[in-house]
């Protein structure tokens, strides 16, 4: 017997409310169908009404977790349109904040993955350690979430010696903790057993479906805008693109932990080699008619902004493609032949904006059309039960 | 096969102080550059409207009270303000900015209209400028600064 399970449109597990209708046979998902467009905020249209400066703060509010990613992607593009070159020091500080943001986003994701896998103490500890980087960001920029560091032509705040020292100290703590989590991941059999083999996405499928970010890298694709099309400082900074070959949620976890280590390395490099000089140049109020595509590696994958100017104070068009959108087709593929109880984990693994609110899933009986509403907490309980009953995957290993 | 590798860490945390603070009773101090609420130094403002133009939330409204007296009124709608401090960056007065940010962060209230702050002031001119370095003549700045 086949059932349809709709998830969403209002579903806090997703960055943008989408509707997922899943056809299940017993516990197994056979097909999934995706509908978007429920959370149209009109931001792109609004951007056409605001001037270049105001739009920095508007695009920053597209996402709460990778706020700096959108703002950076936007200013990169507008700087090209205005033909201005930000000073080196400004760029170093800009991408330092980018990497710190990646650290906070990945630590947040690790906690969420732990929570969805039923490893709540892991969730508590990673989120506690995330406070270290949140405090650093607050110290640098004046706010914990919307850093507002970018301005056209550079950054708005400089770093002094004391701040640099504090950031370096914070990075030492974070690195220690991340190494510990890597060890835990590698040796805690329940955690590895829960994540291994869940949400399989083969390399071929990942390429065909244009997955991006850690989702693609966990399927063995070395795609990273920072390496492939280095913006500003990334061609000077030594770092490696982290990949995994296991193609499942375990791989996505490993990729993110390894990326944390790379981000610490990048931050330290940027701080130790911080050039002296100005942090910003003055930007004109208008941009000549032109168009530009700006790419940026956000914590979740490649972020793309298309900006067109028409010689006035305002953009004529601003189009934003957030990385989560690129990962939706791949999510459908991951869900197929998985279990209902794995839905939260698979969703969490592409790292859409996770909200801690109580969530609801609706179960529709395909034959009778009868609907049952399951609270997300119960779904998680179901997941726990299924995992407790299933045989331990003794052969599941941490891949490194 | 190893079991419960996390256990030593868990046990160690039994004897640790909580990582959180007892919020309403104990408060954390915010860092030096914290972006709180914008406020105006009315004696420095030259009413150039740069802040009004660049405010992304359209939270600043400047109106002229009377033509003859050069009296202006500025209203900051804190319910709309997104605390980005762009108004401070845009403010051209030198060496002290007429617009500034404080460190307040407990802004919640029951009625959003009570979050409005307003100042009625006479436009600062070089002569009345109380600061040692006079601000640029108001006539230069009356419109949008030439770019
Ligand atoms: S802080 Fe930002 S939103 Fe608030 S008044 Fe100033 S420019 Fe407007
Ligand atoms: S002087 Fe500063 S505070 Fe006054 S109107 Fe101009 S920008 Fe705003």
Image (cartoon, coloured by chain):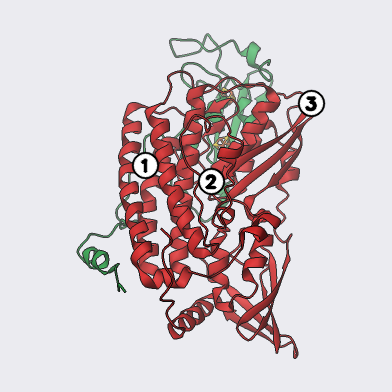
Chain colours: A red, B green
Q: Residue at x 65, y 72 (%)?
A: A336
Camera-near label (3 vs 2) is: 3
Decide which of A231, A50 is in the foreground and name it. A231
Q: Residue at x 36, y 42 (%)?
A: B30
**Looking at the picture, how far across and down is residue A284, in whole percent?**
66, 21
Q: Is residue A149 visible?
A: yes
Q: How crowded is the residue under tag 1: few (<14 C-alpha within 10 Å), some, or many (20+)?
A: some
Give the Cα separation between the discs numbered 3 and 2: 41 Å
The numbered dot on residue B115 is 2
Question: Is residue A65 toward the left or the right of residue A162 in the image?
Answer: right
Q: Mark 1 vs ligand 1: CB under 8 Å?
A: no
Decide which of A95, A71 is in the foreground and name it. A95
Q: Chain of mark 2?
A: B
Camera-near label (1 vs 3) is: 3
Q: Is residue A19 above or below residue B50?
A: below
**Looking at the picture, how far across and down is residue A109, in whole percent?**
48, 58
> Which quadrant of the view contains residue A317?
top right
Q: Which residue is mark 1?
A: B30
Q: How crowded is the residue under tag 2: few (<14 C-alpha within 10 Å), some, or many (20+)?
A: some
Q: Quadrant location of the C terminus of chain B?
A: top right
Give the Cα separation between the discs numbered 2 and 1: 21 Å
Q: Which residue is mark 3?
A: A289
Q: Chain of mark 1?
A: B
């Amino acid at each position: 017997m086949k059932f349809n399970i709709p998830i969403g449109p209002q579903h806090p597990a997703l960055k943008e409310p989408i509707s997922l209708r899943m056809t299940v046979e017993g516990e197994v998902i056979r097909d999934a169908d995706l509908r978007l467009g429920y959370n149209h905020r009109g931001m792109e249209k609004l951007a056409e009404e605001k001037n270049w400066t105001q739009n920095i703060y508007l695009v920053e509010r597209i996402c709460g977790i990778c706020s700096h990613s959108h703002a950076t992607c936007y200013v990169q593009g507008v700087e090209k349109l205005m033909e201005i070159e930000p000073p080196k020091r400004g760029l170093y500080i800009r991408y330092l904040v980018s990497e710190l943001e990646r650290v906070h986003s990945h630590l947040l994701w690790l906690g969420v993955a732990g929570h969805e896998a039923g490893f709540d103490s892991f969730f508590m500890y990673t989120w506690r350690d995330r406070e270290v980087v949140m405090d650093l960001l607050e110290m640098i920029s004046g706010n914990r979430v919307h850093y507002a560091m970018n301005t056209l032509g550079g950054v708005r705040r400089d770093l002094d010696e004391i701040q640099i020292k504090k950031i370096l100290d914070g990075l030492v703590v974070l690195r220690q903790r991340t190494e510990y989590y890597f060890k835990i991941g590698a040796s805690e059999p329940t955690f590895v057993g829960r994540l291994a083999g869940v949400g399989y996405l083969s390399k071929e499928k990942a390429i065909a479906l244009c997955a991006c970010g850690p989702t693609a890298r966990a399927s063995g694709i070395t795609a990273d805008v920072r390496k492939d099309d280095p913006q500003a400082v990334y061609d000077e900074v030594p770092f490696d693109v982290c990949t995994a070959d296991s193609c499942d949620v375990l791989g996505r976890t490993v990729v993110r932990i390894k990326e944390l280590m790379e981000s610490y390395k990048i931050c330290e490099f940027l701080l130790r080699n911080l050039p002296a000089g100005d942090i910003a140049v003055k930007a004109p109020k208008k941009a000549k008619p032109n168009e530009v595509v700006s790419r940026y590696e956000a914590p979740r994958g490649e972020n793309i902004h298309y900006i067109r100017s028409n010689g006035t104070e305002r953009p004529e068009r601003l189009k934003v493609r957030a990385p989560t959108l690129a990962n939706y087709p791949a999510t459908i593929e991951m869900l197929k032949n998985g279990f209902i109880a794995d839905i939260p984990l698979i969703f969490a693994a592409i790292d859409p904006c996770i909200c801690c609110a109580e969530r609801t899933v609706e179960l529709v009986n395909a034959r009778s059309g009868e609907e049952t509403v399951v609270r997300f907490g119960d779904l998680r309980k179901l997941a726990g039960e299924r995992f407790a009953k299933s045989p331990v995957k003794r052969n599941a290993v941490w891949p490194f | 096969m190893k079991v419960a590798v996390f256990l030593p860490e868990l046990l160690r945390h039994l004897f640790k102080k909580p990582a959180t603070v007892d919020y309403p009773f104990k408060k954390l101090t915010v860092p030096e550059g914290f972006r709180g609420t914008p406020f105006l130094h009315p004696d420095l403002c030259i009413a150039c409207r740069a802040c009004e133009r660049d405010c992304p939330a359209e939270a600043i409204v400047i109106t002229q009270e009377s033509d003859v007296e050069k009296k202006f009124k500025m209203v900051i709608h804190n319910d709309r303000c997104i605390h980005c401090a762009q108004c401070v960056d845009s403010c051209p007065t030198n060496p002290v900015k007429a617009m500034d940010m404080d460190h307040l962060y407990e802004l919640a209230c029951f009625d959003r209209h009570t979050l409005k702050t307003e100042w009625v002031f006479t436009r600062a001119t070089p002569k009345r400028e109380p600061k040692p370095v006079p601000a640029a003549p108001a006539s230069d700045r009356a419109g949008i600064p030439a770019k």
